[in-house]
Amino acid sequence: MLFNSISFLVFLPVVFILYWFVTNKSLKAQNILLLAASYFFYACWDYRFLFLLMFSTLLDYYTGLKMQDAAGERAKKFWFWLSVIVNVGFLAVFKYYNFFAASFAELLSHTGLKINVWTINVILPVGISFYTFHGLSYVIDIYKNRIKPERNFVDYAVFVSFFPLLVAGPIERATHLLPQVKQQRTFDYAKAIDGLRQILWGLFKKVVIADNCAEFANLIFNHSGTYSGSTLALGALFFTFQIYGDFSGYSDIALGTARLFGIELLRNFAFPYFSRDIAEFWRRWHISLSTWFRDYLYVPLGGSRGNTWMKVRNTFIIFIVSGFWHGANWTFIVWGALNALYFLPVLLLNRNRNNLETVAAGKLFPTVKEAAGMLVTFGLTVIAWIFFRSESLHHAVSYLKRLFSASLFSNPDFEGKKMAMLTLGLCVFFFMIEWLGRERQYALSHIGEHWPRPLRWSFYSFLIFLMGMYMSTSETPFIYFQF
């Protein structure tokens, strides 16, 4: 069930009405409803993988209790490693087995040995990377004595599978979400309206920006060998807008939907394309994943403490693992390594904490230095996205070679160029709204707050009109569903 589908348009109001008008007198009933709705939501993708989600949930719930009740450290370690190995094992089999098998066969072929490897022909369970990380953070925190295990199974299961975040995040922590699940919730009209406003902006990002940019990004990337460098530059730019509009749009819809039910999820994006250096970019892009790797991998490895070698090693580990988390392809690994290379100068010069505040806070325009920093960071990010989008390393390298050729300065020429220019115009409008709202949680949070009601509603109606005008005729999945 897609957020941008008719089925979700029916599903959400039904659950909302039941939640606030039927089960509102009982927290237990509300949580049971949320769990049932979440499982139904997930089953709409493929009911067979619902049992995998339920098994993972039961495993982490049970091992959490066993760790708490363990008689000694040895027993505690056993239950901890059982949960970690089984969870990571499922992820490895479904997501990475074919990659490792094919890579191993290719490596042997270079030595003259040719083998036929056995591969599995199964689709990737949607959201497995996200709910696996929910469970892993939970059992790690119990093992480290940061939290106590949850003894109410329904409450824990809601934490793992709450439908707004189930298939593409944000990656929640038990310390943040579980207390909200266990706390009595009352309807707040202002929060509900704010949630609807964030859903509207998320849908605009997805339907108007991401889906229309995807059309031209796909066209250009899929036929990159026939286009000029200038056209390839546009293709990379379209994908840059697409992935941001798509993923941050999903996060906005997820956060807004959760707020309708009185729950606040972790913020996942903070206007990353307005970053002045790559360190700031990674503090603002996919925040829940970046902080997960920071807390559960980077810091345990030593973080930025220690000598230069340790700093370089830890930086490459966290970025390469982050790239590999996105998909079983060398393109994602190189994308991660490239971002590590971007990050190293900032880290080694101790400038990785320089830009903690919002750019040009309280001002309409940035300084020349800030604008230059944003432009360079954005340019480096666009280049990195080429590896992320390409089908293979050969495709990415060929794309870059053709991009940085003499034809970069030619006039772009491809099918649908006029519509593409219109889409770029929509992107400019979109970025203007994002810039004006960059000091808030999301762009529309306070834009128009003090406008007369007719003007404010006219603006919202205009956004809805644009969605109607530029909406795809078919339901388009979100990019991060494949991860």
Image: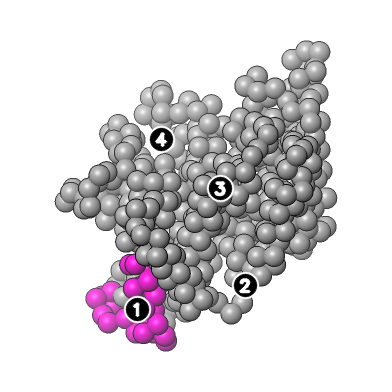
Q: Which amino acid does label 3 sit on?
A: Tyr
Q: Distance between the residues labelled 2 and 1?
A: 24 Å
Quarter of the image that includes the C terminus: bottom right
Question: Of helix, strand and loop, which one carries label 1?
Answer: helix
Q: How far apart are marks 2 and 4 (CA)?
A: 43 Å
Instruction: Return the residue found at the far left.
Output: 368
**Can you see residue 95?**
no
Residue 350 percent location from the top left of the image: 30, 31
Q: Distance between the residues labelled 4 and 1?
A: 42 Å
Give the labeled residue for mark 4: 312
For the residue pair 300 and 120, the one nearer the viewer reads as 300
Residue 51 percent location from the top left of the image: 83, 50
Q: Looking at the image, how many numbered discs can be counted on the residues?
A: 4
* Label 1 environment density (alpha carbons within 10 Å; few <14, some 14–19, many ≥20): few
Q: What residue type is labelled 1?
A: Met
Q: What residue type is labelled 4?
A: Val
The tag earlier along the polypeptide, 4 or 1, is 4
Image height check: is 321 above or below 399? above
Which residues make up the magenta segment?
406-429
Indicate left or right for 112 with 339 as reference: right
The tag earlier along the polypeptide, 2 or 4, is 4
Residue 414 percent location from the top left of the image: 39, 84
Of the numbered discs in the image, which one, if any, rests on residue 475?
2
Colouring rule applied to residues: one colour
The tag earlier along the polypeptide, 2 or 1, is 1
For the residue pair 30 and 346, the one nearer the viewer reads as 30
Of the numbered discs in the image, which one, if any, rests on residue 421?
1
* Label 2 environment density (alpha carbons within 10 Å; few <14, some 14–19, many ≥20): some
Indicate left or right for 66 with 254 as reference: right
Q: Do the residues labelled 4 and 1 touch (CB within 8 Å)?
A: no
* Label 4 environment density (alpha carbons within 10 Å; few <14, some 14–19, many ≥20): some
